[in-house]
Image: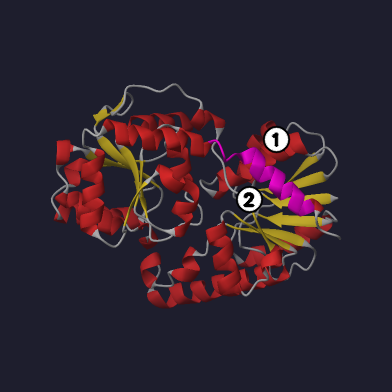
Amino acid sequence: MKIGIDCRLWGETGIGRYIRNLVLNLQKLDQKNEYVLFVLPKNREETLHFVQNDNFKIIVADIRWHTISEQLKFPQILSKESLDLAHFPYHSVPIFYNKPFVLTIHDLIPYNFPTGKASALPFFLYWLKFLAYKYVLINAAKKARKIIAVSNATKDEIIDHLNVDSSKVTVAYEGVDSVIQNAKIKNQNYNSKFKIKDYFLCIGNAFPHKNLERLWEAFSVFRRNDAKLILVGKEDYFYKRLKKKAQDLNFSDRVVLLQNVSDQELTDLYRNAIALIMPSLMEGFGLPALEAMANNCLVLASDIPALREVCADAAIYFDPYDIKDIVMRMEEACSNDTHYYSDKKKKGLERAKLFSWQKMAKHTLEAYNSLTL
């Protein structure tokens, strides 16, 4: 087959990491099919250096996602390549693209949290955007030959909310990048680059489903060991709003926001934290939890299906709606019960070995090859 992969989010975090690892491992696993990678102009050079397989071709598609051009022009670019199959690793699929395709759905978080709080847009414009998202998603799920979910929790959501037959949905778990997993372990609870001792770590954006406002409330109460809270993310509208809340709660001096963190720096942050804390109300997979376990970092996690699926008995769970419960788990993580938490970390290291990007690519390739075109 000649398979096209939409790689326009190549340089982004999250889905970009998923796309890069998919392409990296397909090069190793598949010597039969041909691939066409559609990238933005800014990612062309990086992709050219990344691809080391003659069966892979790169096409520049100067079209951003969630735009009119995506809906009208991108199908034309795809059609020029005479693809047997396309793979959209993100739900933003052109509604007029009518050739066979596979779709990856990472989560249905916007579907489950349809409130204006999840956007900096005016409420009316947000709802128009939400309705467009919903229409595009439902259309894509209906037309896709196969849907890849990143967890069984997400698969259940897809079947329930999008009215998709279960036989159409397959699960391919995410993995941990080797550069994040293979660094040497440094002194516990001390980060050499950022000069911070005794800290909890929180990774990702500050959208409302991440539940950081309750974490803020909990951290304003928590005072054990003068520990700090390091957030790795982007200082956008939501983070600025949270910084204002930290000032109001009088603990802004104990919160550190880090941006543009490299993989090596992220590894250092994981391995020297008291614990990673994930207070999310919903996740599609929970990649930071997996990365933390692979780096001998204790995980404090919301008791939600996706995080239970990834971490099993290797994490400490709390009720994400109960601020007192969050505080209690942070206090316990700072206790002297080293045997108990060493056991959790050991289980986490073993648990993380069950996941890999190579397995993800293998399951994805199986999904490609299962289709009769």
Which residue appears at 44% of the width and 37% of the height? 347
> Compared with residue 183, is residue 26 higher up or lower down, i.e. above or below?
below
Which amino acid, mark 1? Leu
The residue stretch that appears in magenta: 353-368
Residue identifier under label 1 = 48
Figure coloring: secondary structure
In the image, taking residue 148 as reference, residue 194 lies left or right, namely left
Tell me the mark number nearer the camera, choosing from 1 and 2. 2
Q: Quadrant of the C terminus?
A: bottom right
> Compared with residue 98, is residue 193 higher up or lower down, i.e. above or below?
above
Q: In the image shown, does 227 or 196 lie closer to the viewer? A: 227
For label 1, the crowd category at 10 Å Cα-Cα, with few meaning under 14, some 14 to 19 and many 20 or more, is few
Which amino acid, mark 2? Ala
Residue 177, image x and y in percent? 55, 35
Res 332 quadrant in image: top left
Q: Secondary structure at mark 2?
A: loop
- Distance, label 1 to label 2, CA atoms, is 26 Å
The disc at residue 352 is none
Which residue appears at 34% of the width and 57% of the height? 238
Which residue appears at 27% of the width and 54% of the height? 215
Q: In the image shown, does 38 or 316 lie closer to the viewer? A: 316
In the image, taking residue 302 as reference, residue 131 lies left or right, namely right
Q: In the image shown, does 73 or 227 lie closer to the viewer? A: 227
In the image, taking residue 337 as reference, residue 281 lies left or right, namely right
Residue 263, image x and y in percent? 47, 33
Res 371 quadrant in image: bottom right
Which residue appears at 59% of the width and 50% of the height? 9
Q: Main SS type for the magenta part?
A: helix
Residue identifier under label 2 = 172
